[in-house]
Image: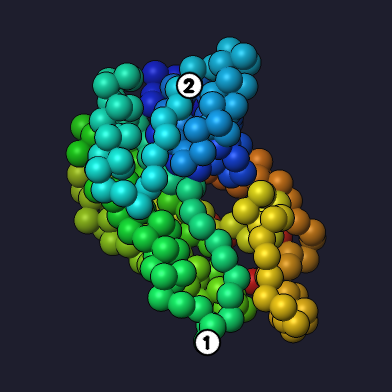
Amino acid sequence: MKRFEKRVALITGAGSGIGRATAERLAVEGASVFCVDLNAESVAETVSGICESGGTASSHCCDISDEAQVADAVQACIDQYGSLYTLIHMAGLLRFERTHEMDLVSWQKIIDINLTGTFLLCRAALPHLLQSQGNIVNAASTAALAGLPWGAAYSASKGGVLAMTRSIAVEYAKQGVRANCVCPGDIETNMTVDISMPANMDTDLLLRISSLSGARGPQVVAGVIAMLASDDGAHITGEDIRMDGGTLS
């Protein structure tokens, strides 16, 4: 199935995890994929794998919390491919800290990357998406829908992403642009596997973020993103799709 032939996708967080899996999935389905990540080496690996498999992809290094770098990244995509059909924003930062011990610098960094970064990318991409009648898929989280222990900043940022995406969906629906979120939970990526947890934590609280069917890899999220970004999702906007193996059911 080639749902993305002659279409351009800009994917952030493409160096690993859900972003990489999504870049690989859309490339297989015919997209020209502009892969963005802070880690130049890892995003180059993503692009190399796609190209070796016969796909079309290029890489760009960007700090998504930096306004100028985001503008440059979107313009570089347009300069290379001539258009933009879908913005798939998966880059983010997860940290677990006790709320009463979190300093303002840590709080602000998570907000800057997860929430402000999402705004910057959407703002830069929207003029081009209006031309292509394209769409946005943002990464929210089950943390936007239910309490996440030791994750006050992360939850706040993802709740903001969800609310902002819905606002964008309403604002631009009549102009032909769709905007949706995915809300993954219990997905195995480098961000979740390598995360440090607070000392002497109450391990029973981890049951709140554990799926009933076990953790899954990022490919299960990539498949849903591909549907939302394709014409199969043509009547879906302002939605958040939860993929958590029943955690919040």
> Which secondary structure, mark 2?
strand
* Percent of width and height locating residue 44: 54, 26
Three-letter code for the amino acid on which mark 2 is drawn = Ala
Q: Is residue 235 visible?
A: no
Relative to the observer, which residue lies in front, 232 or 239?
239
* Residue tagged 1: 100
Which of disc 1 and disc 2 is earlier in sequence?
2
Q: Where residue 113 sits in the image (x, y, percent)?
A: 41, 57
Q: Residues within 10 Å of mark 1 (few under 14, many from 20)?
A: few
Residue at 50% across, 33% down: 40
**Circle nearer the viewer, 2 or 1:** 1
Considering only vertical position in the picture, is 116 above or below 190?
below
Query: Relative to 127, is 76 on the left or the right?
Result: right
Judge left or right: residue 78 versus residue 186: left
Q: Quadrant of the N terminus?
A: top right
| Location of residue 117 with respect to 201 vertically, above or below | above
Element type at mark 1: helix
Q: Which residue is mark 2?
A: 57
What residue is shown at x 68% (from left), y 70% (from top)? 197
Q: Quadrant of residue 124?
A: top left
In the rendered view, would you say 1 is above or below 72?
above
Residue type, mark 1 in image: His
Q: Nearer the viewer, residue 229 or 110?
A: 110
Does residue 79 lie above or below 231 as drawn? above
Question: How crowded is the residue under tag 2: few (<14 C-alpha within 10 Å), some, or many (20+)?
Answer: many
Query: From where the camera sits, is residue 93 visible?
Result: yes
Q: Is residue 30 left or right of residue 17?
A: left
Total number of numbered discs in the rendering: 2
Residue pictured at 46% horizontal, 41% vertical: 38
Q: Residue furthest bottom?
A: 100
Q: Position of residue 147 (x, y in %)?
A: 57, 78
